[in-house]
Amino acid sequence: MAGLQDRTRFEHATVESRIVSRWLESGLHHPDPVGTPEENFSIAIPPPNVTGALHMGHALNGSIQDTLVRWARGEGRNAKWVLGTDHAGIATQTQVERLLRSEGSSREELGREAFVERVWQWRDQYGGQIVEQYKRLGATCDYDAERFTMDEAYVAAVQKVFVELYEQGLIYRDNYLVNWDPGSGSAISDLEVEQREGVRDTLYKIRYSDDVVVATVRPETLLADTAVAVHPDDERYRHLIGTTVTLPLVGRELPVIADEHVDREFGTGCLKITPGHDPNDFEIGRMHGLEQISVIGEDGLMTEQAGRFAGLTPAAAQEAVVAALDAEGLIVGREEYVHTVPYSHRSGERIEPLISLQWFMRMDELAPPAIDAVTSGRVRIHPPSQSRRYVDWLEGIRPWCVSRQLWWGHQLPVWYRADETYVGLTPPEGDGWERDPDVLDTWFSSALWPFATLGWPSDTAELRAFYPTDVMVTARDILFLWVARMVMMGLRFTGDIPFSDVYVHSVIQAPDGRRMSKSLGTGIDPLAEIDAHGADAVRFGLLAMSSTQDVRYSAEKIRQGQALANKLFNATRFVLLNVDAAEDAAPRPATVEDRWILSRLQRAKADAAERIEAFDFAKLAFGLYDFVYGELCDWYLELVKGRPFDADLSATLRHVLRETLLLAHPVIPFVTEELWDSVAGTDGQSRLLAQTRRDGPDGALIDERAEAEIGDLIETVRALRAWREETGTRDLLVARANGPDATRDALARLGKLEWGEPGGELVRIGSLEVPAPAVDTAVVEAQRSARRAELEQEIARAAGKLANDGFVAKAPEAVVAAERDKLEQLRAELGAL
RNA sequence: GGGCGGUUAGCUCAGCUGGUCAGAGCGCCUGCCUUACAAGCAGGAGGUCCCCGGUUCGAGCCCGGGACCGCCCACCA
């Protein structure tokens, strides 16, 4: 750290890239696959989308994981943070399609093979972006073993899982009502559907017969009606059950059936049943064995079944149907209706429920072991409230639609020939087979992430050394989508849980409480923040913000982190500009403040370890801040300024500084690494801080007495400063003290006083008695009477408490005794005033 | 329609198993360029802990009810 004298600020911009290079060159992020999973520490990163750019969520997620990984390395553990990206089927395909459109081309024009080729090209060009951005954050992922969910080996793992689950009867093909996303032209799973509230529609009341009027917001779907349902106990309609009504426009005879799903209070109490286009009706239809008619096809247009409306868009068909009904006088009511409507989370378009032949995964066999893993405590979810959500969801789990009508993804290992279906790892023998064009839901491959990235199904050294992983760090929104599925698949295919802890962290909201999003313009770019304040500041700030609930982005916390980095920089500067070049880094405490700081340091270490253990990153960050500011800098460094920087003090200062850098490193790795060079000692090795082992707290260095003595000193100096501030007293004071003399000199220096027998009127400040300046006796008296009032109030409270028989009789003895002591002290102080 | 979380200083948030718990950071005010740091130092002001009941010797903390905010799940056309 040349030119330390001239630099009074930590200039992150000039050092960060150099430090990243040193870390990467050291290879510390790429551990050898030795040791056991119990000894080692491993994390699998939630794979960012290959198309993605680093957003605030990644930055928080990455800061937490890197802190954990660095902490583990500091303990001397072999630590691996598995890195990789997700092919993100729909998202990626959509982006490339958009690009093609801008070039006047389209996916269809290219054809499947060329399109997929194009996506790979695109991925090669832009896919590395987010990985590079993780480096800016200081994330020490294993960049030398980067994975991708479309890698050859990963594809093989996915296919194997599909084939095995098929053979075990868990994967099957069925005609089922699915969530059709017209935007992506594919079915999507229930979890990818967003129920949007407050959508305004028109509720049409349509007359089917003299007795039957139905209400619907989708009049065009009446073309697919196959029944009308009423509640079995509904007196108004009981006589109709078993009869039929004629479907307007179509002429089909619809049976009137009884079903308890019908709400008698809603509308007229008659429900049109459209099994082909409504999830509810689909269930009712299956129970009553009704025909399923599809009038809307997968191309998003009305089908042949829609008769004269065929070929129209559903919206146009709605208009036409309503007009036709109007012409016949069958629309008997229209009203505005606000309700909840499903939308695609992917494309943002309104879901079109329709019947489609898709592949599904049965979950009833997979869910129970995954529930047990959490309820038995083998997998611990933090905070615990999240495990209830997890269990509840798994208990109500339904079949998962795993096929997607996309081109980018893992194509199903399924072939058809006439009525035959073949599922296998290799294409079937013989002619005439055609492969299923569909691909798997992206989350199908993500579910294998913790073990497929380590080489499963091969029995690799990586798998043996790092699986199961230690902790999964993720946001709440993918607890079902991803975490639950990893547990199910891990248990099924590796026979072991994929991780022992799940830490569910905050979602960072915009400062105004809205969602951070590009479209709202509420996003804050973490890279811009890193440029402005440094990676350490961003990491510290995000950790300090983090919580078990969603939090608003706080620029102050980032600045606080920046201030901390700068503070450490200057503290180091101060030490290095003063100490001698002692080689010995062992502490040599010579005074009470030396013993005090060593004692406080041990506590800071123990606190940090506890907070890591508890995944309490906000307290970890603030604890560090408090130690550096509130103890090391504000008091210890100020205290030693009055002493000669001899060999003893130098050794102690160097030791404390080294230990502080080691302790802070997992949170603020850049500034600590930069400073480490200067204090690492003269052992001739230029070893990275990131590779240096950290000692745990040393109980032998805890010194209660030193803590009490310096605690008194601090209190007295503070009281004296407040008094000076209030009375405007600047003079050197002659003071009389009655305490021990261990801290006499320090007290004199920090309190700006000298010892002696003061004359004139005296005032007590902490443990001191100093002369009240004559000019300010009014102020002193005011202060004194304020204190008197305060004391009297507290005495009254304590005395009242003790006079309460209930309190004395029922409160624990220790509490009562403490109250008595307190009262006594208060009275003593009042008497002395 | 269920379920969960929140409501504490101007702002963002801590407050563990009820007994110095009324806190932190930022902001604000005052005074300081005290030779590591003005991205600094010292000091200070600021709060019916959402409301109403209850339990208790004692309640931000526990219980009941209510109000508002947010999230998740859910097949009422």
Image (tube, coloured by chain):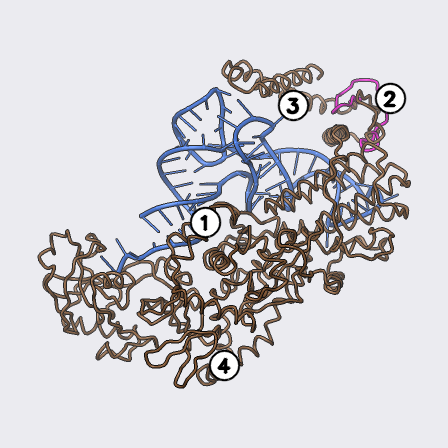
> What residue appears at the point 52 percent right and 55 percent down from the top-left corner?
A496
Q: Which kind of residue does numbered mark 4 sit on?
A: Phe
- Describe residue B4's horizontal placement relative to residue A694 as left or right: left
Q: Secondary structure at mark 3?
A: helix
Q: Chain of mark 4?
A: A
- From what the image shows, is residue A832 above or below residue A11? above
- Magenta stretch: includes residue A752: yes
Numbered mark located on residue A786 in the image: 3
> Is disc 4 on the same chain as disc 1?
yes
Distance from the alpha carbon under mark 1 to that under mark 4: 43 Å
**Circles 2 and 4 in contact, beta carbons < 8 Å:** no
Quarter occupied by the N terminus of chain A: bottom right
Q: Secondary structure at mark 4?
A: helix
Q: Secondary structure at mark 2?
A: loop
Distance from the alpha carbon under mark 4 to that under mark 3: 81 Å
Front one among A391 and A329: A391
Crowd around label 3: few <14 · some 14–19 · many ≥20 (10 Å): few
State the residue position of label 2: A756
Tell me, what hue is chain A?
Answer: brown
> Is disc 4 on the same chain as disc 2?
yes
**Highlighted magenta segment, given as a residue range:** A748-772
The image shows residue A283 at horizontal and vertical percentages of 26, 61
- Describe residue A296's horizontal placement relative to residue B32 as left or right: left
Q: Which tag, 1 or 3, sits closer to the chain's start?
A: 1
Q: Chain of mark 3?
A: A
- Whether residue A405 appears in this view of the structure is yes
Quarter occupied by the C terminus of chain A: top right
